[in-house]
Amino acid sequence: MPEAPLAPVSNQVTGDRYRITVLTSRMLRLEYSPAGRFEDRATQMVVNRDLGPVDFRVVRDAAGVHVFTEALILDYDEQAFSASGLTVRLAGPYGYHSQWRYGVPNEPNIFHPGNLGGTARTLDMIDGACALEDGLVASNAYAVLADDTIAMAGDWVAPRIEGNTDTYYFGYGNDAAGAVRDFYRLTGPQPLLPRWALGNWWSRYYAYSADEYQALIERFEAEELPFSVAVVDMDWHWVDVDPKYGTGWTGYSWNTDLFPDPPAFLAWLHEHGLKVSLNVHPADGVRAYEDRYAELATRLGIDPASGQPVNFDVANPEFLKPYFEEIHHPLEAQGVDFWWLDWQQGNVTSMPGLDPLWMLNHYHFLDSAREGKRPITFSRYAGPGSHRYPVGFSGDTVTSWASLDFQPYFTATAANIGYGWWSHDIGGHMFGVRDDELATRWFQLGAFSPINRLHSTKDLFAGKEPWKYSAPARTAMGESLRLRHRLIPYLFTMSERAHRLGEPLVRPLYHLDPRPEALAAKNSFAFGSELLVAPLTTPADRRTTLAQVTTWLPAGDWTDFFTGVRYSGGRTVQLHRPLGGYPVLARAGAIVPLTDGLGVGNPDAFELHVFAGADGDFTLYEDDDLAAPRSVTTRYRYGQAAGELVIDPASGALDLVPGVRAYRVVVHGLDGVGAADEDGTVLAAETAGGPLVVELSVVTAEGATVKFTGERRASDNRVESRIFDLLATAQIEYPLKDRIWRTLQDEPDTLRRVSALQVMELEPALQAALNELLLA
């Protein structure tokens, strides 16, 4: 992996036993070594310490050394690091409130929640919330990460220098996004994901046969439920093994009772557009009954006739290379695309400080890039720096509302440590209860998650097939799965932005707006550059039939992607949706490209959603899905004042995309608007209400311009018709419905309407749902 672990000498302040490296004006590396030897190698966490020149000054006096940057002030007594001898504080308005003393935890208090969290190794067996490790963002302006991880020496690993202290200080104030961007500069970027990884994944812990799995995929196809990844859990290999070998938890040989012709099975899945991942629990090594035992044993100097097991020793390079070449590569030659590394056996190896999970992630990811393929692995989080090895498996969660409620917060907060590609067990893995509403809300969250992988345990009643649920749930689930695939052009572009710009797909709202109100909206998140999602994670009110969520909206106008309701931002709002609805809001000026089909390739046709109210600019990214990609970009520009949408000529490797593409442009937020091309030819008649839809064919190398005609007035929210629909479906008394409706008809002024409803002492859920529409 590319690395530049040695910082320039000009950025270093040194003494006999200490070294202070000014990495940026807001980031410091603080080392103390009793032996005076310092770590210049890359580590598990850090690969690049040359972040460019930094303007700073140093003052030495009787008290010690003082370092001043544009943003930070460091005071150090030049002794062994201590709370009294080493402090850092932010310059400017933060002052002493931001002072950090070495070794003193950043504890929350009544004024500050302190560190806002990073992520956790696993959600195994968690029902609801769990503790998070620290991240890079804190309400009191600074965060600290200790780097005691293993060193990387060439193409292998080595222990760290014994007795050394190695700490990184991040003083980014309320600039959460800046802290994460510089963390990627220090630790390496998130890789660009394969495009197919952004579709739906089917996964279930279940002993499928090849015929059963193929029949399932055919049923999905018949119901137009798209999937791009087929995960086969551990029953692909033998699990009922002779007790003399131990358990069948670890395995590397196909169960030919279930899969009599593995290459044919894998080829069939590929023919149906699916990439394939197999689950492996590697801890028990390779035992004598495995198909490839003799080849691996021979290479390791073990007599195959002895039956001596090959122990799993990931810290031994003499083991790891043959392990890949004799065990994994032959299975990949049959058609396995990537591995689900299900490591559950702790963080200790024969090398002190070396985490076996990190070793698995690191080397499997690198190995998967053989032959120019875009690398990917699927495994648990192994600490800071793990973002370099997507995708993350969060573990076996409990099926409950509490687990669903924690999941969006957990996913977004992981951005605070740069970990952007979590894959959860969508719908929950085990235990819990059957609840169609819960399952539906989880499907909807999955459509707006980094990775959407349905999963469930080995239970006859726990499958996530949509046809196993009630009709309303089944419909909403199918819509969510189809929407996910239609979002792939947007998602893949966001994946490239995450890689190039250091901007994770899912981020907490305080990355956009640092106000305390944004901190309170713990479950809401930015979904790429254009959208905000406020997940529904509690049951609907049984009287209104609507689920509710409270969220902060950053300043500006926001439009519901599905309903078209516009909201003014810079405030906290309550949103209410029926089972088939979900709160996804687009900022004014947003441009969101969808594919007009359900495949995962570079599409022939787009549905381009444009949200009026401000200028918009979006550059679509597409490529060939290889490790060293050839790419093509297409820029879309919306001018609010000019009243036009410009589709620029595509640039780059144009042979990767169709020469002519169909566009269905959907413009939200304007009434009394029509459309014409540059020559004045009418493309769409003026709308009286609802979004404007324009159909056109665009030559990729030439682009096109759509001119919007007519009054182009901002859409109203059609409040009365929406309230009528709300009352029509509410499970409340008919006289109460009539009374509310008459009150609204008698009073045209919005604030008086709200006041009149207030004195009626309506049930809180009903009052809140009405207020949402009246005050949007």
Image (cartoon, helix red, strand yellow):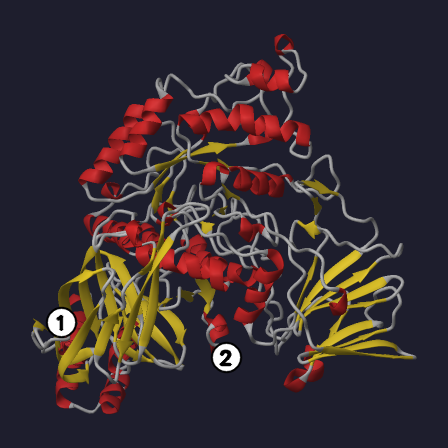
Point 61% across, 57% down: residue: 187
Q: How many marks?
A: 2
Residue 149 pos. (x, y %): 70, 50
Spatial CA distance of label 2 from label 1 is 43 Å
Residue 16 pos. (x, y %): 89, 63
- Vertical placement of residue 454 versus 181, above or below: above
Which is nearer the eye, 520 or 12?
Answer: 12
- Residue 605, quarter of the rendered image: bottom left
Point 69% across, 77% down: residue: 55
Q: Earlier in the sequence, mark 2 or mark 1?
A: 2
Point 56% across, 48% down: residue: 381
Which is nearer the eye, 267 or 256?
Answer: 267
Answer whether residue 24 is visible to the viewer in this image: yes
Label 2: which secondary element: loop
- Residue 231, quarter of the rendered image: top left
Which is nearer the eye, 357 or 25?
Answer: 25
The residue that label 2 is drawn on is: 515
Answer whether residue 504 is visible to the viewer in this image: no
Quadrant of image for the C terminus: bottom left
The residue that label 1 is drawn on is: 734
Residue 410 pos. (x, y %): 49, 58
Q: Identify the amino acid type marked 1.
A: Tyr
- Vertical placement of residue 471 versus 252, above or below: below
For label 1, the crowd category at 10 Å Cα-Cα, with few meaning under 14, some 14 to 19 and many 20 or more, is few
Label 1: which secondary element: helix
